[in-house]
């Protein structure tokens, strides 16, 4: 309801023949950029909520406190038409299934693979769950993608702060770990993700987000043109574990230093591509420090552009190789192989067992802090 002063100035403007550009009611509505609604319950009856963040341009991100999952993200094409550009489900049921391929989720404690589920820290060996053949993947059987996070709205918004305490020994990891993930949707059409954590015992930590993007909204991603700001990548063995080498991308199908369609070289008889059934590799980024450009993706039909900025040293480029048509997603869409791609900003896979890789150790008294930004535009 308008106050006395609002009514007075509105009446004065009308009497003078002006159509006011400022509307108190519209201003109030513009501030209401985050909304919460029920999204179901877990099998143990924990409440799941869905938060909708909307910016001044109508770009919309929907995030649930279950797994910190980015459920949908609506971005405009070159004509201003909005479409949901991330894979996922309409309701919570799909996310609660054990075979869900981490759609949109926060991954922890350790994103990507740890060889044979083992690592040593301060002279002690720790053993983790083997949930990817003989290896440990994405935090184990019940990683951060499968827990209900605490959630609160942030006034600087539209922003959503999620928090979780991972107890000492959870999934085999040492130390009580307090984690925060803040999603912010800016008026520059950026989805900013800020990760922070502290621990009371030395542990390892490698947080990321596992969103599958499709800038066309549906169908194959093979026509998407990708640039990755990396001169090197980490080759992998049969189990997709890095060998420890940092290999030049030059002269290989891994060379995305200049934009290339995802499908241009994905079927080449290259040993690395065959191991991952396509792209499923960590790239060693050229940037560093402040969020630097890691990758740019352009979808020529819609004109949508995605730019990824990060403080992390690496990014996992994954092309949905293990989607097989068995999953029905939003609106009944069947997700076939290579219907979505991931750009998971990260430290390198198996870093705890590769002393030459950047360290993922978090010690008591230290603060883990990383930032990744997904920026959308069109051309």
Image (cartoon, rainbow, N blue to C red):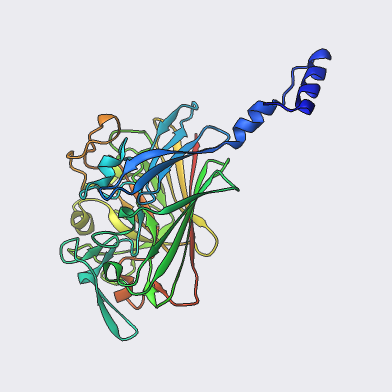
**Looking at this view, is 97 or 36 the one in front?**
36
Quarter of the rendering occupied by the N terminus? top right
User: How many numbered dots are placed on residues in this image?
Assistant: 0
**Looking at this view, is 374 or 368 the one in front?**
368
Farthest residue toward the bottom? 123
Residue 195, image x, y percentages? 47, 59
> Residue 13 vs residue 75: left or right?
right
Residue 47 visible in the current orientation: yes
At 36% across and 39% down in the image, what residue appears?
Answer: 39
> Residue 322 vs residue 146: left or right?
left
Relative to 115, is 102 above or below?
above
Residue 347, image x, y percentages? 38, 65
Snapshot quadrant of residue 71: top left
At 49% across and 41% down in the image, what residue appears?
Answer: 376
Residue 121, image x, y percentages? 33, 81
Residue 70 visible in the current orientation: no
At 27% across and 50% down in the image, what residue appears?
Answer: 44
Snapshot quadrant of residue 303: top left
**Looking at this view, is 235 or 320 the one in front?**
320
Residue 34, image x, y percentages? 52, 39
> Residue 265 vs residue 167: left or right?
left
């Amino acid at each position: 309801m308008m106050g006395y002063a609002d009514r007075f100035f509105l009446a004065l403007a009308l009497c003078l023949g002006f159509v006011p550009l400022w509307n108190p009611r519209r201003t109030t509505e513009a501030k209401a950029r985050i909304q919460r609604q029920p999204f179901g319950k877990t099998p143990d009856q924990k409440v799941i909520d869905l938060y909708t963040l909307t910016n001044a341009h109508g770009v919309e991100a929907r995030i649930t406190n279950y797994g910190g999952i980015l459920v949908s993200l609506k971005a405009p094409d070159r004509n201003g038409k909005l479409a949901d550009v991330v894979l996922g489900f309409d309701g919570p049921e799909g996310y609660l299934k054990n075979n869900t391929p981490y759609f949109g989720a926060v991954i922890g404690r350790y994103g990507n693979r740890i060889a044979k589920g083992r690592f040593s820290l301060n002279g002690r060996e720790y053993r983790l769950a083997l949930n990817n053949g003989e290896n440990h993947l994405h935090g184990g059987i019940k990683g951060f993608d499968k827990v209900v996070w605490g959630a609160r709205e942030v006034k600087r918004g539209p922003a959503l702060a999620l928090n979780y305490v991972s107890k000492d020994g959870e999934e085999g990891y040492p130390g009580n770990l307090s984690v925060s993930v803040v999603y912010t949707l800016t008026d520059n059409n950026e989805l900013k993700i800020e990760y922070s954590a502290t621990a009371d015992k030395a542990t390892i930590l490698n947080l990321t987000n596992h969103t599958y993007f499709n800038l066309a909204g549906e169908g194959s991603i093979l026509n998407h043109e990708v640039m990755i700001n990396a001169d090197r990548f980490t080759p992998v063995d049969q189990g997709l574990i890095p060998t420890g080498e940092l290999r030049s991308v030059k002269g290989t199908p891994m060379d995305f230093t200049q934009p290339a369609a995802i499908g241009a070289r994905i079927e080449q008889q290259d040993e690395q591509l065959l191991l991952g059934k396509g792209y499923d590799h960590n790239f060693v980024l050229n940037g560093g420090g402040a969020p630097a450009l890691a990758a740019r993706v352009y979808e020529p039909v819609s004109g949508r552009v995605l730019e990824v900025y990060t403080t992390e040293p690496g990014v996992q480029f994954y092309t949905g190789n293990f989607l097989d048509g068995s999953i029905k997603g939003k609106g009944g869409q069947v997700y076939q192989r290579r219907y979505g791609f991931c750009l998971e900003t990260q430290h390198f896979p198996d870093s705890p067992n590769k002393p030459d890789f950047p360290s993922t150790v978090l010690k008591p008294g230290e603060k883990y802090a990383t930032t990744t930004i997904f920026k959308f535009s069109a051309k």
